[in-house]
Image: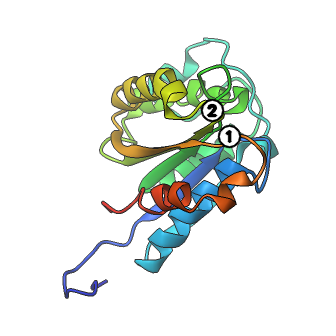
Amino acid sequence: MINGSGASIRVMKILALIGSPRKKGNTDLLVDAALAEAAKHGHKWEKLYLYDYEIKPCVDCRVCKKGELVCVLKDDMPKLYKAIDAADVLILGTPIYWYGPTAKMKLLIDRLRPYVANRKLEGKKAYLVAPSEEGPSACGPLVDGLKMSYKYLGLVYGGEALITANEKGEVAGMPAEMEKARRLLDDL
């Protein structure tokens, strides 16, 4: 694909994983803004709501340490692994709960262990969208933890949109915050 200045750009497939239980809430709206802007530049995307999937907690059985996307737990993770494998770029979208991700997002992160061994995520970019009632200052523990996790998985930390918002959908009326989300993927 050729951009407006005549330079060739690679079309990326973006996977947004939404860890909020609120559809059309702040996390969802912010991720939508980032995806819509990326689509204007020809990128393709898919958005999955983690609360639509059964994700059981890791029991540290270590079967996945071999790098295979096989787990003793029978749940929906194989569907999520397939989507993750097909993506060039990941966005994790989660509101801040007790200075970390939602429980559902944490379950997903814990179940990414096979990628440490198989290195299938090596070099892929990953971003974060995180609204918080307290604002960006409350996001530090999540950002620090994700940066460490991304590095462990071989992911490249692309950046974040840390937003002050709490009431469902209120971010739609906050142009500056929506603009932060729209600009999130500008480096693709």
In the rendered structure, the answer to whether residue 104 lies left or right of residue 183 reads right
Q: CA distance from mark 2 to mark 1?
A: 9 Å
Graded by Cα atoms within 10 Å as few (under 14), some (14 to 19) or many (20 or more), the crowding at tag 2 reads: many
* Residue 83: x %, y % from top left: 58, 53
Numbered mark located on residue 169 in the image: none
Q: Residue at x 41, y 27 (%)?
A: 116
Q: Which residue was labeled with disc 2?
A: 108
* Residue 38: x %, y % from top left: 45, 69
The answer to the question of whether label 2 and label 1 lie on touching residues, with beta carbons closer than 8 A, is yes
The residue sitting at the top extreme is 60
Q: In the rendered view, would you say 117 is above or below 61? A: below
Quarter location, residue 164: top right
Quarter of the picture holding the C terminus? bottom left
Q: Residue at x 56, y 62 (%)?
A: 175
Q: Which residue was labeled with disc 1?
A: 19
In front: label 2 or label 1: 1
Amino acid at circle 2: Leu
Q: Nearer the viewer, residue 66 or 18?
A: 18
* Residue 8: x %, y % from top left: 22, 80
* Residue 179: x %, y % from top left: 49, 62
In the rendered structure, the answer to whether residue 95 lies left or right of residue 137 reads right
In the rendered structure, the answer to whether residue 8 lies left or right of residue 159 reads left
Quarter of the picture holding the N terminus? bottom left
Amino acid at circle 1: Gly
